[in-house]
Image: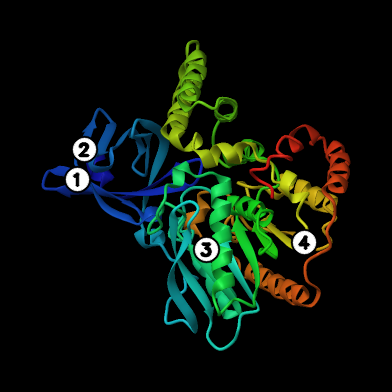
Amino acid sequence: MIENSLVGVWNGTIFLPTMPIILLAHFFLNGDEMAGYLDVPTQQATKIRIDIFQNKNEKIIFNATSIDFSFYGSGENSSKLQGTINSFSTLFPIQFEKIKNVSEYAVKRPQTPKGPYNYFSEEVVVKNKKANVALSGTFTYPKNQKPIAAVVLCHGSGGQDRDETVLDHKPFKVIADYLTKNNIAVLRYDERGIRNSSGNFFKADDVDFAEDAIVGIEFLKNRKETSESRLGLVGHSKGGLTSIIASNRSSLIEFIALLGSPGVSGEEILYEQTKLILLTQNISKSTYEINLQSAYNSYSIVKNEPNDSIARLKVEEYFNTRLINATGQNKTDLENAKASILVKFNEIVSPWFRSFLVLDPATILVHTKIPVLGIWGSNDIQVPPHQNLGPMDTALKAAKNRNFKLITFDRLNHLFQNIKTGSLEEYGLIEETFSVQVLEVLKDWIVKESVILMESGIPEYVSDDEVEMEYEADCQTQRRAKQSRKWIMEEKYLN
């Protein structure tokens, strides 16, 4: 009877640190034997064959060897399967629930622009000659008038394509379409080493990405369509950090807009992010504490140990020491946390991740005189406004920046979607790609600042000595002085 009750479609979610992965398991009878396949709608993968299926002693096992995937668990009843997924030696707890309407999980993205467009859209290659990198991108600009402004879009963390595609959402394509329709030209490109761009993403650090953004600005300056436009950067998430660094390395950049961007070091963000993500999950207090401590200690080891191989050994030693006396669920939680960290270890020791861990944006913002717009969603659990807005405000005030605006929008997440629960699981379930309200504010601010810049020019200069003295006082008030000075004189990040 249990085999017959398995026939149908089952929905489950793997919760990764960066995003949730939705799985649909389709089971059917092929003669007298059970068969099936997997769909991963959030990654647009379908009909992944289940080639091994076992159902013995109320234990259910099924494998999809083409993607190194296996499930081991049991049926609590005819509508739930509880168990563990093993994928590439990493374990993930999961609960599958039987569903009736499969169409509910079809990916719908109504905001994604579709041609023909009422503006020019040109495929371009932007060359960073210094790094020997060719960035493949899309340049959009109005048909019948000179754009008042032109911007380069700067990506969030992880290798991103020109549309910043995530879970079939294409936020950069949506932003570019909206801005271009409102007389703002846009350049967006695949990050180095991603899709059609050359180079190696994992060997680049935050300065390298900033230099790519700068050559994008130089491209806009040299195009006849945008040679007289005001030039700026729009950065999402870690792309805001890229924008901050770039703006202090190029006088061509006249304004920056930061969307869900960091105001504190990456280490601080990751610790708070891990806490908030874990709180959205239905886990015990001990599981929460083990995962939080594991993430914090692993990132701390990587930050303090420059040698990648030694860092890995130290992380393994940390977990192995804790596992010696661990039993029951604590042991399982530690093993899962260890596997989760090690499977992404090459990423967390990459140059960009290492620089992200230690770099405090505030130490650069104290040198930032150009107009700055910062926008967060109140329900952002990846770069939360309660952690990042205040330090950014303090730094810009210390810089005597007379033209900045920091805003929080209610009930928006890190992708600027209107939320229901605020969990990462919603990213792929919400049809909206990007809040139109935020797009309108972004557009209005760029147009307004471009008009002001045309009339008044560059903001007046304030000496670095004056900036540092005032910033030190503010940092002491906020109890952040010990971190804020660490990178202030690092020439790599400043002019």
Q: Could you say which disc has been placed on residue 238 in the image?
A: none
* Mark 3 or 1, closer to the camera: 3
Mark with earlier residue (1, 4):
1
Please tell me the numbered disc located at residue 171.
3
Q: CA distance from mark 3 to mark 4?
A: 22 Å
Proximity of marks 3 and 1: CB atoms separated by less than 8 Å? no
Please say whether residue 1 is visible from this viewpoint. no
Q: CA distance from mark 1 to mark 4?
A: 57 Å
| Chain-order first, disc 4 or disc 2 | 2
Q: CA distance from mark 3 to mark 1?
A: 38 Å
Q: Find residue 477 and report its horizontal and vertical position in percent.
A: 87, 38
Residue type at mark 3 is Pro
Residue contact at pointers 1 and 2, CB within 8 angstroms = yes
Q: CA distance from mark 4 to mark 2?
A: 57 Å
Task: From the image, state whether disc 3 or disc 2 is nearer to you.
Answer: 3
Tell us which disc is closer to us: 3 or 4: 4
Q: Tell me which numbered mark, 3 or 4, is placed earlier along the sequence.
A: 3
Does dot 4 land on a helix, a strand or a loop? strand
- Tell me if mark 1 has few (under 14), some (14-19) or many (20+) residues whose alpha carbon lies within 10 angstroms of its own: some
Q: Nearer the viewer, residue 347 or 136?
A: 136
Q: Which residue is mark 2?
A: 53
Viewer-side label of 1, 4: 4
> Which quadrant is home to the N terminus?
top left
